[in-house]
Amino acid sequence: MIALLFLMLMTPSSIPVPQKVFNLDSEMSWHRPLDVAITEGRFFTLDKDDSSLRSFSESGSFLKKFSGRGQAPGESQGASEIAVFDDHLWVCDSVASSLLIFTLEGIYLKAIRLNSSPSNLYQYHNLIVAAPIALDGLFWILDPKTMSTQHSFGIKDTNFIQVPNKKLETLWLASLSTNHQDGIMIGMTWLGDIISLDIPFQHGKFTSNLAQVSDVWDSKDHIFSIQKAGMPAALSINNMFTGPDQLVWMSVLGAQEDQYPSYILRYDPKNHSVVTKINMGDPIRKMRFFPKKNAITLIRSNDQIELYNPEDFSQ
């Protein structure tokens, strides 16, 4: 029995082993993290239930709780994502169509009102891009140093989606977005399919009016094509980012979070093809990449936060 157990422990697993695991379940700090942001010496989490923010030491010791759901200054009506830019904590409030900015000590500084609901934030060179929830929304370009908007643009306004693809005309869930070397990639889900839309974009401006539309994952070819009430089970992209390998990483999950395993896709935006599909087992609520720390975090549906190196996924 002991020999069998040892053999099982030594058997290589297809699921990478995390470098660290955080279970933030102490009496003062337990919550359901929706997102995490790592900076030097500490990390922050966003609560899934009440949009409160918490800071922790690098080892996971609870430091402070601040903000939360509400309409008072420094509160959000429905935060969806957090990020650290230039030593400030930014909060994406999708419900109030605004961005909140705090110091790393949790002091509220200001709110930036937008004309459309932001879905996620990422850095593009020395600027910040706030991507919209829906394709008829606006992308906002912001300067982290002045904490102000520079300009905005809309995808549909610029006639990028002039393609013979009925899926895009009836798109029910728009997207998450990330940058790569040659532009911006939007990942979209339509029933059981994942579609990418690559937009040539450099230095805050479009470089072409031609977008590349590609099927990333067809529902006919994978586990999520299980029929439910006559309809294929839906996919959702929890998050996406450009990794150190210049591939676009996506965490993908079926609509029923507790029934399907999660996958990480690595997608080549140049060749418009999936390079690897990694079955990650238990559902992933959120996946993030932090270039300065060379770290990837996964938030599992059981509220556990796992810390990885990008190299862990290539072994």
Image (cartoon, helix red, strand yellow):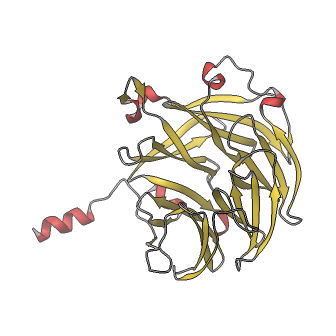
Nearer the observer, 197 or 116? 116
Q: Where is residue 176 in the image (x, y as percent from the top left)?
A: 64, 44
Is residue 180 visible from the viewing direction of this image?
no
Image position of 236 (left or right of 229): right
Q: Position of residue 157 (x, y in %)?
A: 83, 30
Number of labels in the image equals 0
Residue at 49 percent across and 29 percent down: it is 218
Q: Is residue 256 above or below residue 53?
A: above
- Residue closest to the far front: 71
Q: Where is residue 2 in the image (x, y as percent from the top left)?
A: 12, 71
Q: Is residue 114 above or below residue 232?
A: below
Q: Is residue 55 above or below residue 182?
A: below
Image position of 16 (left or right of 47): left
Residue at 14 percent across and 64 percent down: it is 4
- Residue closest to the far left: 1
Residue at 64 percent across and 25 percent down: it is 168
Placement of the N terminus among the 4 image quadrants:
bottom left
- Residue closest to the far top: 164
Q: Where is residue 209 in the image (x, y as percent from the top left)?
A: 83, 29
Is residue 234 visible from the viewing direction of this image?
yes
State the image quarter where residue 70 is shown: bottom right
Nearer the observer, 134 or 250? 134
Nearer the observer, 129 or 46? 46
Image position of 49 (left or right of 243): left
Image position of 137 (left or right of 24): right
Placement of the C terminus among the 4 image quadrants:
bottom left
